[in-house]
Amino acid sequence: MPKLSQEAVQKINFTLNGEAETGMAEPRMLLSDFLRNVMGVTGCHVGCEHGVCGACTVQIDGKAQRSCLTLAVQVEGRAVDTVESLTGRENPLSDLQQNFKTHHGLQCGYCTPGILMSASEYLEKNPDPSEAEVRDMLSGHLCRCTGYAGIVNAIMATAKERQENKSEKSTAG
Amino acid sequence: MKPRKFDLVRAETTAEALAALSEAGGEAKIFAGGQSLMAMMNLRLLEPSVLIDISQISELSYIKEAGDKLEIGAAVTQVELLSWPGLADRLPLLHQAIPHLGHFQTRNRGTICGSLSHSDPSSELPLCLATLGGEVVLQSVRGERVLSAANFQLGMMTTAKADDELIVAARYPFKKPGEGFAFTEVAQRRGDFAIVAVAAVASGDTFRLGVGGVADKPTVRNWTNLADENLDDELNAFAWELKGSDDIHATARYRRELVRRLGRRVIEEAKACRS
Amino acid sequence: MAEAFVPEKFVGKPIERVEDEALLRGLARYADDYPARLDTRHAAMLRSPHAHAEIVSIDTSVAAALPGVVCVITGADVQEYVDPFLNIVKAPMELWPLAVERVRYVGEALVLVVAMDRYIAEDAVDHIQVEYKVLEPAVNPEYAASEDSPTIHEKCDSNILSDREFTYGEPDKAFEECDRVVKLKIDFPRSSITPMENYVVMADYHPAEGVYDVLANFQGPFTVHPVMCRALRVKNTGLRLRTPSNTGGGFGIKVAIFPYIVLMAVASRIAGKPVKWVEDRLEHLSSATAAPNRVVEIEAAAMNDGKVTGFRLSQLDDYGAFLRAPMPGPLYRMHGVCTGSYEIPNLYVRNRLVMTNKSPSGMVRGFGGPQMYYAIERVMHRVAIELNLDPLAVIRKNLVAANAFPYHAAAGAVFDSGNYQAVVDMAVKEGRLDEILKRRDEARAEGRIYGVGYAAVTEPTHSNMGYITTILTKEERAKRSPTQGTNSNATVSVDPFGGVSTSTDVPPMGQGHATLMAQIVAEQLGLQPTEITCNMEIDTQKDKWSIAAGNYAARFTSGPAVAVQMAAKMMRDKLAHIAAPNLNVPVEEVEFGNGLIFARDNPDNCLKFYRVAGTAHWSPGSLPEGMEGGLSESAVWTPRQLTAPDEKDRINTSLVYGFNIDFCGIEIDKDTGEVRIDHYVTAHDAGTILNPLIAHGQILGSYSHGVSQALFEEFVYDEDGSFKSGTFADYLVPSATEVPEPIILHMETPSPHTPLGAKGLADGNCMSTPVCIANAVCDALDLENIQVPLFPSKISALIHGEEQPPPAQMAVVETKPGKSDSAITGTGSSMVPADPQTVWDTLLDPEKLAAVIPGCHGLDQVAENDYRAEVSLGAGPVRGKFLASVVLSDLVEPTSVTLAGGLDGPLGSSQGEGRVRLEAQDGGTLVSYEYSVEISGKVAAVGSRLIEGGARVVVNQFFSRLIKQVEAPGSVTMGSGSLSLFQRLLAWLGVK
Ligand SMILES: Cc1cc2nc3c(=O)[nH]c(=O)nc-3n(C[C@@H](O)[C@H](O)[C@H](O)COP(=O)(O)OP(=O)(O)OC[C@H]3O[C@@H](n4cnc5c(N)ncnc54)[C@H](O)[C@@H]3O)c2cc1C
Ligand code: FES
Ligand code: FES
């Protein structure tokens, strides 16, 4: 049973955005601080550090969750995905990202990475959501700039396009 | 907003967690989903010197039928329970209540037993446990005991769990034939802790109302053969017994008002869907 | 290129934003993302748990000795390097970067720790011990303004820092001659817009040049830069302030970062290292800033036909503990429009500015508009109701007429353009008002609660720097050098390969300024917006800026955007002059498009854009006579309409004035009192729209602030000044489930005052939406007035009448009110098996008393009946350590004693008093008690609901220990309470 002493800096081996990575952190370091200040992944934003705002949301083993309520050492051996994973560094934006652009789903963009990480998991699980369901999913995120309409529209549009692509593929196949 | 220092035990088995709890002599805290714990630690309102992470204990990650109850291990998250296939049919109250508990993102991490242990008087899961007459299974190096909701929930964030005990599982009774259920709550925003949450179970001539958010723990009242014209007075008496208190978002009076009004609403709904 | 060339237009098109690529990939650069030097150290602050207290002593020794701590800095240390911040009002009120001698609000910073990282800095903060002498606070603005109130700044005579009266037209006559006077009193709450990104400052002092080099997510106005420089005792060049390319929302909040800029600058000097501070959310909510709460008394002089002929407006604006630049903007930037969108010639205004023991207020989106329009639009609604008229008819009757523009409002605003009636017509028709009214009828017929509300707002944008001097009398103004007008700066450059870059004097807060700049420049130079590089960083040592710079008052579209266009035109002109001889056409016939520069009438006669640009760099010798080489054009835009206040105190507060009319239908749940917005329409005329996509987004954001102001947001202070809204679970920012999408409509009446014709539109709904919703609720419930936020609890009390009483046989224990409503109070009694004298002796013996007080580690007697102790409350995981003081008074041996005292520690503070009575009874002594406790600081800010229970537990524990002590003296060991008091206090998340 691993017992990590408070004073000892731990080595953390994990998968970050698809790549094997190693970083060092004390047991008390929050995952959000670790990602930003140790791993240099600044797409993970911090807005409250008490679980309410959702800005720090990342995926751990594919599930969207608060990195400010997670300890860095807890991701040992696990896969962490941040907004940087949604498309390759030099690839075009993903459909979800592009729809945020098209539907003006962001202004200052501070809340955006967290929302994208929630939405991308959510659409995997619930590919054809109603607007009310999308809003419910979004209730775990605070955005001060947009009034949410653009965000809702971007997510709905992505779901719709994916549904259409799927049915096109199935008719084609 | 950063936590103080602590040692971290990443338990892989229940026995390890229990041993670590015992060794820490009341200085340890269990980390299940961290959705309440870490927030308080970041605010430095809690400063355990040892944290015991039980989220990776595979033997606690199970959902199983145990007689007339569903047993949910301590590592099971709220999302996992919500996706248990039989939930809507066999535990309709939980099926209705869990979507009110925080958000999709917090339910991905938060556990059932963590919420019971945290025992916030406004929480949905303790309310459902009380209303359904469920129980929790506690273990320590000293042994195991099973406590009914009534014996487990003592007051404002206070339970009968001893410092060295771990809640290993919670048990929620399945729907019995002829029962009807209803749940609703008022919260300021979607996913906030409820100002008042009410849960009702009706069966034959009896019905039961559980109320969260008013007294310092979820409180349940049973009625049998109550004439409808007396219901309002009964609810009023219940509301006044629970009394409630003021805070920055709602008054005690408002809480009582909701007990009277939402109480009636869910009782009627529960009666209507008896089957 | 055969067919006739049509130049490509970008301005006015819904172009996708150029900012978004980086933002969506997580590659944007916010202040906290900028690289820090390797030896950068991190700051955390100790903040006051008290609303008002003298600092008796500060002990930093333990904190300073912790490994990893670089230095610990107090107010006195900072005073060696800085002067107090300057202010428009001359009053003996000194604002320092750290509190000196006194603290004046909960959350005020008094000690700064610099350490290796933020974790260690916070550890050290918890080890600082401060002894306070608590002073009487003044929290309610009306109380603070009264003679009974304690003064917050001991050198000031009162808490009123300014009291000005203004008369325009003949208000007394209007009120005498009118048919009806309609009055209302408004108590507008405190709130903020809490950007998702908190403050960030990274400061580095360069001793060689004597320059403070600071990166901060500061938003301007840069009028505050000289204020910081004066405090730092340097010229403007001595503070090199840089702002990042991205900021996570501003909304005005990010001007109030400036005291921290100065603080970190000084800290880096003292520490000899770069110092970085990232504010956390608790700090932000308790201490960053807030829109001032305001008490407004408004009177309207109305004629029976609904015509309003005069207003009387008395505004008491609460600026909290300090007046901080650019305050009191919220009162005076709206001054010119005190008559709203209406033709009301007679006006009396009284503006008072009061100090209270709350965090200093400041600039927040809407900037004084939400408060003022709440009063104006509520009173207009009331006029209609009292005269039995339709509220919309009353609005229409009074709106400035279309043929009256430019309209000179009573207090001096010059409304540049508009057709308000036409906007209303459009809103009514396209927004389907008839449907909403029908829905109201249907709902009411079914016994549901439904209401309709309206609000009209003239939105001033692009401030006149001179407005603030309206607070001075004309004699005072005459003595100062004049302040009036405003500047905007922009630069457009073209590099040797034809790359185009542009910059201006506005730190971006998310509004899409880069896109608008790219549109404007691309259109002038015949390129694509994506080809324009917009560098949005600002560096005060290198960039072109002036003190009006900054992101505020929606100045972008009518200010910096104009400067960008001017610079782009200058660039175009220069390139045209270079190209003309080569194309062999007159300059006027040179056209730009598709990356080419060509002859208008013969597009085949063309040159590549980059070639022409290259000439200016590679071959300056070949340029036309009189033309200098290089390609960098800077423009300054100084509109002339903005003058200083005149003799009669009339002031044209802003350059341009937009307009919007809103209406909405709301339904109230009969059981729960919840307000649901059923239908919301907002129709705007903001002049020319530069990018509809962005305009739409700005209105949505502004509207959502309006909704949250109406329904959710308030910073709550108790009467003792303790702050109750310390987390996002307490301070309610609505989410997607709470903000339904409105219908947004537009009309475009270009402004003649700005070359682009554009006005701002980002503040209007902050002003109109709260009152529009409140008007609908008043309509639904037939109320005379209501104060926001409209919590369901508040509405329920209005719709549910008298509460159904408890059953007759039930005894309901009423808690007695304490010193204030906010105090936790209790009474009780306990039988102690000993005679009164024994109990008395226990209470009066320090050693025994120490054993009885939960968690006490021994009492030090500092005077007769006056003790100090270190107490740790709660055992096991929690261990909140406190410095306790206990004073015994009113001693009547052996029958009664009063215990008063307080606790101070990292978790917060409490002040309490209890009276204990001892009465001999069979088998012992009946000890009866009553107590009242006030709690402030962190625990109060984040855990109010649980404190009451906690206090009761401590009291119970006190008595159980007392019983044990008298039964078997010595059996109670010190500091071993197994009680989890703080566990109870701590369920902050559930706290409502
Ligand atoms: C934004 C937000 C909104 C929320 N809204 C709601 C809401 O509406 N309703 C609601 O009920 N909750 C709400 N919560 C809290 C909920 O998400 C938590 O899941 C729950 O309270 C605790 O579960 P956890 O597994 O995260 O427990 P943790 O946070 O890990 O632990 C909570 C406490 O229980 C103890 N503990 C946990 N598991 C055990 C165990 N097996 N044995 C012994 N002790 C244990 C811990 O030591 C700790 O003291 C919200 C949280 C957030 C962040
Ligand atoms: S920063 Fe993690 S939820 Fe706000
Ligand atoms: S875009 Fe600024 S907070 Fe969401």
Image (cartoon, rainbow, N blue to C red):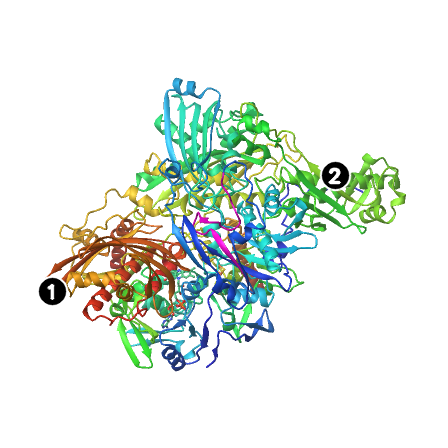
Q: Nearer the viewer, residue C107 or C632?
A: C107
Q: Residue furthest front?
A: C864
Q: Earlier in the sequence, mark 1 or mark 2?
A: 2
Q: Residue B18, which numbered label?
A: none
Task: Kindly identify the residue that appears in the image at 58 percent across and 38 percent down.
Answer: C760
- Above or below, comparing residue A21 to residue C109 in the picture: below
Q: Residues within 10 Å of mark 2 (few under 14, many from 20)?
A: many
Q: What residue is pinned by disc 2?
A: C569
Q: Quadrant of the C terminus of chain C?
A: bottom left
The segment highlighted magenta reads C92-114
- Above or below, comparing residue A92 to residue C175 in the picture: below
Is C805 left, or right, of C552 in this rendering? left
Residue C783 in the image: x percent, y percent?
33, 36
Does the stretch in magenta take in C979?
no
Judging from the image, mark 2 belongs to the subunit labelled: C
Is B71 left, or right, of A58 in this rendering? left
Asked if the residue at label 2 sits under 8 Å from ligand 3, the reply is no
Q: What residue is pinned by disc 1?
A: C923
Which amino acid does the dot numbered 2 rest on?
Answer: Lys
Which amino acid does the dot numbered 1 rest on?
Answer: Gly
The secondary structure that most of the magenta stretch takes on is: loop
- Above or below, comparing residue B201 to residue C77 in the picture: below
Asked which quadrant contains residue C488, the reply is top right
Which secondary structure lies at badge 2? helix
Residue C898 in the image: x percent, y percent?
25, 53
Is B1 left, or right, of C930 in this rendering? right
Mark-to-mark CA distance, 1 and 2: 98 Å
